[in-house]
């Protein structure tokens, strides 16, 4: 939807050659954005895609004049409808923010004032952007209108609620209402859906597209998810290391990416691949016998309180079977109970009823000492590579810890040899032995966590969202690593994730969970091709990047 | 590859030297911090080798030379009995600092242990310990120290004991809070999953990661303890005169403040400077180690 | 909600009881012969044995400890903490005599301390230059570092002896209140200011402030509308400690300025080991601390809707 007059008018937002530096020392400045140029015309939906550290957030902060004190604009210009606002102070920028450009922040949980009601916060947004004075009743009406436009049908009720009484999706819609309240001409959204479930994400993003059509505003969407960008934008820009490396209409970028990095990003996107990743060492062996079986697992948490909110049924009669050498994925959105299930399978928590069998041995109800013995066969990899490694331990100490605990590889030399062997298996080397986690990247840390998990030669690994905290390109590498390790060591995986795209890449079987119940289970190909349950269908439809698959299947 | 490894090995050997050089460099850029460390070192010098800093003795005085104002001969002037005030301050450092150190050691040692047990054991043990700590927190530490000293007897050791006991609670509380936050971290769960036992987890993961906050508090407590010891000395609970102690020095000059103010103010100012210095050091330690 | 209330009240009562027990142990159990403490140290050796026995009997020292404890506890619950050894008057009356003077001083000092703390925190947050902010942030630490007796003496020296603006001692008239009030306010303001500066800075950096910026708010508006309320609330959490600081500070301040008050009376009581009076004072202070904490625990939910909701569910 391009306006034929767009070329003649000034674009809503034009950033030219913007360079932003961060202060990293007394007199040292490190560039975060190097000469970025972009523009958004009226009614255009433009996406800015980049991984962490690409500078996309800094760029947006700069455009809004919201840079922190440790940053400064070194060069370049920012113009709204032809008016240059570069270097404007807070007071002048206050005139632009809200009534010309609206901002939708990333985290709905921290972006609303927790002690003020929603209505009041939206009214503030209305009031600050008033060209002429109006009375309280009109403000209220304007606020309610804004809430409705943002997709909150029950605007009257939300008006009187506090942020903590709303769900994540509703809070994000409230933030959209705040952004719209000043009747801006362009909206800048900084990863507005990354904190939300995938089905809610779809609804919110669809809504943004609708707003664009109804109100004719321009939208600049910043995201790390290429699929999300490709699904809905007119134009797409790819940012890396502070520079814009690719720009163009979506169709063109998809089919004919000019830049190498863009091509790699496209390849790394899970939706790009037709099926499962194959290990480098050759075709996979056939699946073997059952190694892990869970039956009828139930767990209820008691919450403090009376009435219906008293209990939370995290798991209700869940069954699971894992065959040797295969990956069983557990997929669901937040609150589905998948982390609880993973905890129970790994022996960190015990179910209220039901059993877990590791081969012939029963896991549930074991004493602490017996459970410890089982640990040699069943290991766990956590989601957050930043908190699962002791920040004071070196890599060598981290990987050696299980060896020490079980008295394997006595003697320093033997231990170091074994640790080096494990590091090599995860594509790290001796260089990393004496590094601290703080000196490693997210991907490297996760590799260390995997090496640690393999130290005892377990048969089964339970991975709880092990790649969710990583960038897309790093994610692809780790998934590949996991697949190779599986083939080499005959490992079986239980892989918990919320990302169906990842499921297709790595899993043989899948169980779809919602509200503590397994709604569907079966081989991946079958569930993906002909889902039987409505919820599974919903999830499949919400996977961003449907367009990628079509283009990639060549 | 070999060249790289060699350089890395060299780097590891020099590993000790480089961080120290860098640390000193950073230090040099913060003059106030340097000044604080200097103050602390000087005061420690006063306590350890007082003879080096002054040629006068703390007990001998020329009665005819009473209440002389500060001069080149007597940096702080003289007191009522003609004793050199600077010398009394220098020797007083020994008294005050020994008491302070002892007090902080008691508070740190006992408080950290109590906090560790409460936080790690949890449940009933935690609740019981916390209730006891509540009581100690409810009574202002000065008051508690005063009562303890009165009961045990007036002496510097007892002041140290009293101040130490009354500070145990704040160490315990901070340590417990740290332990509670560390214990819920993923890496602790991971350690259990790797087969490490409870004692191992406590010693190798919980304690090292909890201590840094408590150490910052210890530095701060040194300042607070100095003030408490001096306050008790001022109120007359310390070793009886003529033993010099900073609070006592201020009290001795108090009655003559109208005509000879420096007799109280200078020792008091020295005290304040030391406390400010320890606070500054503690703040910079906290900033360095903030995760 | 009810459970929360009951829990907090129970905790407060426990603290008071425990303070009573602790002082009992310190004052009645530890000393070798508590009867000694009841006499003037200079005369204690000249007291004839029959008089000692008589006094011991009247205080109940000849009975087993646990009975003594229970008896005292029983009396205390009805408001009788015994009689002061020095004055012979009931402990409660003695304390009530001097309480108003201290309350006046403490209330004034608290008000001033709060004003100082908020001004420093607001200034530090609004300051645009880094060096100014660092300076302001260092002030509370300095305030805590200067010993109360020194600042009191300095005040006397400058404002009383040199300039003659205010009287040097005594408790008559408002003018005699000024110097002690300022002296006491300084160390009390320190911890509050430190907390507020940190709290303001945290709130200023939070996500909802960014949203406010994005709405088109101005810096001043943000500080007043968003930050002030959210950042000011945590100051309540140190209300108890502040009370403790006020009491401890008043001991020294009242001594330096020769004012009547609970602080000075406590000091005299401890000096002469007027055991019943000491116990009464300590228990009173602990009760004050517990009561203040209880009140804070009760008002906090009223001010923070999140806590209110969490409690309503429970």
Image (cartoon, rainbow, N blue to C red):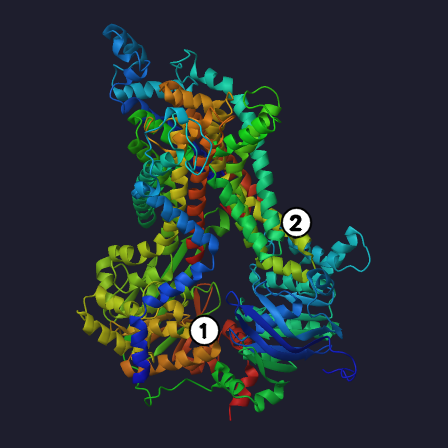
Q: Residue at x 49, y 74 (%)?
A: A536
Chain at tag 2: C
- Name the image quarter holding residue B183: bottom left
Question: Horizontally, is C235 left or right of C213 in the view?
Answer: left
Q: In this view, does B240 lie above or below A415?
A: above
**Visible residue check, residue C190:** yes
Q: How many marks?
A: 2
Label 2 to label 1: alpha-carbon separation: 39 Å
Q: For the view shown, which residue lies furthest in the bottom direction?
A: A554
- Depth check, front residue: B202 or C263: C263
Quadrant location of the N terminus of chain A in the rendered image: bottom right
- The percent coordinates of residue A108 (x first, y second) are 58, 62
Q: Give yes or no for contact between labels 2 and 1 (Cβ–Cβ under 8 Å).
A: no
Task: Please say whether residue C1 is visible from this viewpoint.
Answer: no
| Mark 2 or mark 1, whichever is nearer to me | 2
Label annotation for residue A357 = none
Decide: few, some or many residues near mark 1? Use Cα within 10 Å; few <14, some 14-19, many ≥20.
many
Relative to A476, residue B60 above or below: above
x and y, in percent, of residue A285 in the image: 30, 86
Residue C282 rendering spot, x and y as whole percentages: 41, 26
Q: Where is residue A41 in the image (x, y as percent from the top left)?
A: 72, 78
Residue at 39% across, 52% down: B213
Camera-side residue: C307 or B79? Answer: B79
Question: Where is residue B163, by image quadrant?
Answer: top left
Q: Mark 1 lies on which chain?
A: A
Establish if C174 lies above or below A402.
above
Which residue is tagged 1?
A470
- For disc 2, the marked residue is C224
Q: Residues within 10 Å of mark 2 (few under 14, many from 20)?
A: few
């Amino acid at each position: 939807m391009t306006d034929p007059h767009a070329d003649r008018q000034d674009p809503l937002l034009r950033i030219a050659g913007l360079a932003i530096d961060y202060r990293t020392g007394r007199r040292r400045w490190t560039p975060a954005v190097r000469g970025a140029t972009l523009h958004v015309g009226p009614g255009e939906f433009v996406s800015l895609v980049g991984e962490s550290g690409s500078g996309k957030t800094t760029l947006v902060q700069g455009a809004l004049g919201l840079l922190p004190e440790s940053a400064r604009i070194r060069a370049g210009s920012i113009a709204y409808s032809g008016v240059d606002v570069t270097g404007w102070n807070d007071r002048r920028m206050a005139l632009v923010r809200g009534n010309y450009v609206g901002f939708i922040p990333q985290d709905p949980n921290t972006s609303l004032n927790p002690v003020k009601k929603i209505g009041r916060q939206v009214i503030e947004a209305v009031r600050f952007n008033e060209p002429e004075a109006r009375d309280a009743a009109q403000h209220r009406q304007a606020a309610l209108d804004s809430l409705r436009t943002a997709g909150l049908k029950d605007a009257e009720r939300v008006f009187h609620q506090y942020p903590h009484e709303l769900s994540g999706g509703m809070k994000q819609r409230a933030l959209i209402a705040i952004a719209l309240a000043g009747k801006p001409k362009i909206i800048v959204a900084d990863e507005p859906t990354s904190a939300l479930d995938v089905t809610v994400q779809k609804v919110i993003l669809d809504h943004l597209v609708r707003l664009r059509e109804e109100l004719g505003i321009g939208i600049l969407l910043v995201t790390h998810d290429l699929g999300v960008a490709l699904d809905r934008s007119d134009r797409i820009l790819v940012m890396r290391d502070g520079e814009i490396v690719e720009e163009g209409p979506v169709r063109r970028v998809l089919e004919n990416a000019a830049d190498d990095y863009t091509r790699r990003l496209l390849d790394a996107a899970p939706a790009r691949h037709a099926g499962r990743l194959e290990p480098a060492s050759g075709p996979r062996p056939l699946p073997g016998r059952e190694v892990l079986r869970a039956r009828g697992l139930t767990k209820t948490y008691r919450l403090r309180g009376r009435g219906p909110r008293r209990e939370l049924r995290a798991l209700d009669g869940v069954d699971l079977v894992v065959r040797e050498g295969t990956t069983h994925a557990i997929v669901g959105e937040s609150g589905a109970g998948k982390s609880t299930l993973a905890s129970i399978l790994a022996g960190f928590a015990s179910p209220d009823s039901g059993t877990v069998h590791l081969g012939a041995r029963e896991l549930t109800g074991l004493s602490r000492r017996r459970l410890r013995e089982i640990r040699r066969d069943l290991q766990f990899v956590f989601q957050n590579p930043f908190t699962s490694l002791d920040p004071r331990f070196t890599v060598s100490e981290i990987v050696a810890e299980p060896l020490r605990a079980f008295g394997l590889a006595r003697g320093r030399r033997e231990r170091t040899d074994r640790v080096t062997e494990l590091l090599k298996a995860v594509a790290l080397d001796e260089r990393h032995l004496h590094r601290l986690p703080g000196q490693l990247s997210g991907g490297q840390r996760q590799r260390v966590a995997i090496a640690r998990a393999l130290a005892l030669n377990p048969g089964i690994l339970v991975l709880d969202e092990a790649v969710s905290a990583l960038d897309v390109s790093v994610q692809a590498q780790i998934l590949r690593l996991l697949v190779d390790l599986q083939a080499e060591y005959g490992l079986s995986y239980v892989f918990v994730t919320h990302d169906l795209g990842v499921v297709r890449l790595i899993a043989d079987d899948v169980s779809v969970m919602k509200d503590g119940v397994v709604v569907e289970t079966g081989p991946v190909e079958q569930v993906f091709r002909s889902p039987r349950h409505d919820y599974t269908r919903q999830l499949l439809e919400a996977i961003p990047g449907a367009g990628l698959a079509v283009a990639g299947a060549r | 590859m070999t060249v790289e490894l060699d350089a890395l090995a060299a780097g590891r050997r020099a590993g000790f030297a480089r961080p120290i050089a860098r640390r000193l460099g950073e230090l040099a850029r913060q003059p106030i911090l340097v000044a604080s460390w200097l103050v602390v070192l000087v005061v420690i010098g006063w306590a350890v080798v007082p003879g080096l800093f002054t040629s006068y003795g703390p007990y001998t005085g020329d009665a005819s030379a009473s209440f002389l104002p500060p001069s080149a001969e007597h940096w702080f002037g003289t007191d009522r009995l003609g004793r050199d005030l600077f010398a009394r301050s220098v020797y007083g450092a020994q008294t005050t600092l020994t008491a302070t150190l002892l007090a902080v050691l008691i508070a740190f040692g006992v408080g950290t242990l109590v906090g560790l047990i409460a936080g790690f054991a949890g449940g009933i043990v935690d609740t019981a310990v916390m209730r006891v700590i509540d009581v100690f927190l409810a009574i202002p530490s000065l008051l508690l120290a005063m009562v303890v000293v009165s009961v045990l007897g007036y002496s510097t050791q007892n002041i140290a004991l009293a101040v130490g006991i009354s500070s145990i609670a704040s160490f315990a509380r901070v340590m417990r809070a740290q332990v509670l936050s560390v214990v819920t971290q993923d890496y602790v769960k991971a350690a259990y999953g790797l087969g490490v036992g409870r004692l191992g987890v406590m010693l190798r993961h919980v304690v090292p990661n909890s201590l840094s906050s408590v150490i910052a508090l210890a530095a701060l407590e040194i300042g607070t303890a100095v003030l408490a010891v001096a306050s008790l000395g001022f109120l007359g609970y310390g070793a009886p005169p003529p033993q010099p102690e900073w609070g006592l020095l201020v009290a001795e000059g108090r009655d003559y403040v109208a005509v000879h103010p420096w007799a109280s103010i200078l020792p008091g100012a020295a005290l304040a400077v030391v406390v400010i210095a320890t606070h500054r050091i503690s703040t910079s330690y906290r900033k360095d180690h903030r995760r | 909600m009810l459970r929360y209330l009951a829990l907090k009240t129970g905790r407060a009562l426990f603290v008071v009881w425990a303070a009573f027990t602790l002082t009992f142990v310190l004052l009645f159990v530890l000393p070798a012969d508590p009867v000694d403490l009841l006499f003037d140290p200079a005369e204690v050796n000249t007291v004839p044995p029959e008089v000692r026995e008589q006094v011991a009997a009247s205080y109940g020292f000849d009975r087993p400890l646990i009975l003594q404890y229970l008896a005292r506890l029983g009396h205390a619950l009805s408001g009788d903490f015994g009689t002061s050894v020095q004055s012979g008057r009931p402990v409660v009356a003695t304390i009530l005599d001097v309480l108003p003077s201290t309350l006046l001083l403490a209330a004034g000092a608290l008000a001033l301390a709060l004003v100082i703390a908020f001004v420093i925190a607001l200034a530090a947050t609004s300051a645009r230059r880094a060096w100014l902010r660092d300076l302001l942030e260092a002030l509370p630490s300095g305030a805590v570092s200067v010993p109360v007796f020194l600042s009191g003496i300095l005040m006397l020296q400058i404002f009383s002896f040199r300039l003659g603006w205010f009287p040097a001692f005594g408790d008559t008239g408002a003018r005699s209140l000024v110097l002690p009030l300022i002296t006491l306010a300084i160390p009390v303001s320190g911890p509050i200011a430190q907390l507020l500066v940190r709290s303001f800075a945290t709130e200023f950096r939070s996500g909802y402030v960014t949203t406010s910026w994005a709405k088109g708010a101005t810096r001043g508006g943000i500080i007043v509308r968003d930050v002030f309320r959210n950042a000011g609330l945590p100051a309540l959490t140190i209300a108890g400690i502040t009370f403790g600081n006020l009491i401890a500070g008043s001991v020294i301040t009242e001594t330096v300025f020769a004012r009547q008050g609970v602080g000075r009376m406590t000091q005299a009581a401890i000096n002469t080991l007027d055991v019943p009076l000491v116990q009464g004072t300590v228990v009173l202070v602990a009760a004050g601390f517990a009561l203040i904490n209880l009140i804070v625990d009760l008002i906090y939910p009223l001010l923070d809707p999140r806590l209110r909701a969490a409690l309503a569910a429970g």
